[in-house]
Amino acid sequence: MNTTDPTVIPASRLGGRSAIVLVVFLLLSFAAAATGFFFPPGPWYETLNRPVFAPPNWLFGPVWTTLYILIAIAGWLIWRRVGWRSGLITLWLIQMGLNALWTPLFFGLNLLGLALVEMGMLWIAIGACVMSFYRVSPAASWLMMPYLAWVTFAFILNLGFWWLN
């Protein structure tokens, strides 16, 4: 880490707070994931016509768990550079909110079309994070790329469900 860079908060100034903030980012990420607990797929989902490229249901848990960890680390890396009072942290929080909103729309309210539109907004927010984070922390930007790729696939999958049903 370049200690002469004024945007970098030296680890010595962070102390144990850095680990606590990482836990906060992990909790925020997994709070978005918790919507799946409150709005599980349910029997109606099993009756939907599935796109031929839909992966097996068991795959979603491991993929999203990995992605939520990467998203949290990316947010934490940005925080280490800019602190809490930054548009970048706001952008990170916006994409997490959009992430959390999709599950109630799709599984809770069965609004496949609205969920698709919302996921498009999520995709834009993630893309904005990827581009904006790069200037401050290339590592944070790269950590968001698998998430962007998966949401791209999920958008196409959501489109398929909407089209077929």
Image (cartoon, helix red, strand yellow):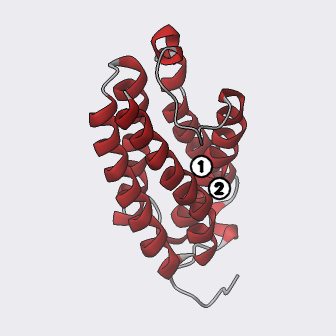
Residue situated furthest bottom in the rendering = 4
Residue drawn at 63 percent across, 40 percent down: 64
Q: Is 161 displayed left or right of 137 in the figure?
A: left
| Residue nearest the observer in this picture, 33 or 165 | 165
**Mark 2 lies on residue:** 18
The quadrant where residue 132 appears: bottom left
Figure label count: 2
* Residue 31 higher or lower than 11, as above or below: above
- Camera-nearest residue between 27 and 54: 54
The residues tagged by marks 1 and 2 sit, at their Cα atoms, a distance apart of: 5 Å
Quarter of the figure that contains the N terminus: bottom right
Q: Given contact means CB atoms under 8 Å apart, are the residues at marks 1 and 2 in contact?
A: yes
Amino acid, disc 1: Val
Left or right, 40 with respect to 89, comes to right
In the picture of the structure, the residue carrying the numbered disc 1 is: 21
Amino acid beneath label 2 = Ser
- Give the answer, above or below, for where 100 lies relative to 73: above
Q: Residue at x 37, y 45 (%)?
A: 119
Q: Position of residue 131 (x, y in %)?
A: 44, 74
Q: Residues within 10 Å of mark 2 (few under 14, many from 20)?
A: some
Which SS class for mark 2? Answer: helix
